[in-house]
């Protein structure tokens, strides 16, 4: 399951998305749920959604702290929540890899608990007809994996956490 939080008029809204068959079950803050059979980036700045019967195209614009959605002539602006006065950003130097842009997870090449080498390919994100490869920042172990093939993620979503391998684990002492 993927949970994302956004601020809307001072309120925190939580959106839940979980895979169901070949699609996703989306739970809105109102309690409404929707089954999506397709979700893809059709052209830059446009997301196409389908429930198998209807198809919607939604224009969006992402910044580091906000997503703007244009739907049926109305602009909706959602901000990322802040914790302790700073935005929710992480550094790959700390072992936390986030989505550098919105896109589709096309390949997941590791599993939780896998040992990885510095520079090893961990997953592939497709965005705007290009592939973005996320690599291990250092040798370590995949502590957390929050990505599934076929999943659409937003910029800043935490995808993989790698913890450094302790040098004593490899020693004979």
Image: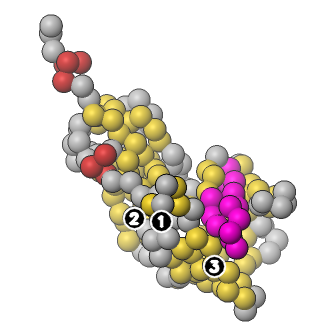
- Label annotation for residue 77: 3
Residue 100 bears which disc, if any? 2
In the image, residue 62 above or below residue 147: below
Q: Are marks 2 and 1 in contact (CB under 8 Å)?
A: yes
Of residues 154 and 151, the one nearer the viewer is 154
In what element is the residue under mark 2? loop
Which percent across, then down, holds residue 77?
63, 79
Position of residue 6 in the picture relative to residue 148 (left or right)? right
Residues rendered magenta in the picture: 5-19
Q: Residue at x 74, y 76 (%)?
A: 55
Label 1 crowd (10 A; few <14 / some 14-19 / many >=20): some
Image position, residue 17 (x, y; %): 68, 54
Residue 56 on image: x %, y %: 72, 78
Asked if the stretch drawn in magenta spans residue 173, the answer is: no
Look at mark 1 in the image and give the residue it sits on: 155
Q: Earlier in the sequence, mark 3 or mark 1?
A: 3
Q: Nearer the viewer, mark 3 or mark 1?
A: 3
Direction top: furthest residue: 173
Q: Main secondary structure of the magenta part?
A: strand
Instruction: Give how far apart the Cα atoms at labels 2 and 1 are.
Output: 5 Å
In the image, residue 52 above or below residue 94: below
Secondary structure found at label 1: loop
Between the residue at mark 3 and the residue at mark 1, the CA separation in whole angstroms equals 15 Å
């Amino acid at each position: 399951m993927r949970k994302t939080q956004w601020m809307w008029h001072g309120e925190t809204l939580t959106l839940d998305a979980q895979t169901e068959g070949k699609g996703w079950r989306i739970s809105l803050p109102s309690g409404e749920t929707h089954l999506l059979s397709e979700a893809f980036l059709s052209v830059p700045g446009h997301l196409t959604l389908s429930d198998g019967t209807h198809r919607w195209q939604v224009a969006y614009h992402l910044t580091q702290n906000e997503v703007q959605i244009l739907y049926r002539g109305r602009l909706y602006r959602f901000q990322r929540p802040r914790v302790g006065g700073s935005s929710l950003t992480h550094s790959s130097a700390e072992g936390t890899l986030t989505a550098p842009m919105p896109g589709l997870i096309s390949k997941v090449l590791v599993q939780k608990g896998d040992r990885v080498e510095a520079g090893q390919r961990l997953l592939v994100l497709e965005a705007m007809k290009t592939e973005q490869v996320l690599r291990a920042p250092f040798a370590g172990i995949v502590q957390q994996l929050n990505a599934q093939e076929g999943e659409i993620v937003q910029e800043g979503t935490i995808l993989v956490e790698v913890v450094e391998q302790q040098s004593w684990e490899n020693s004979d002492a």
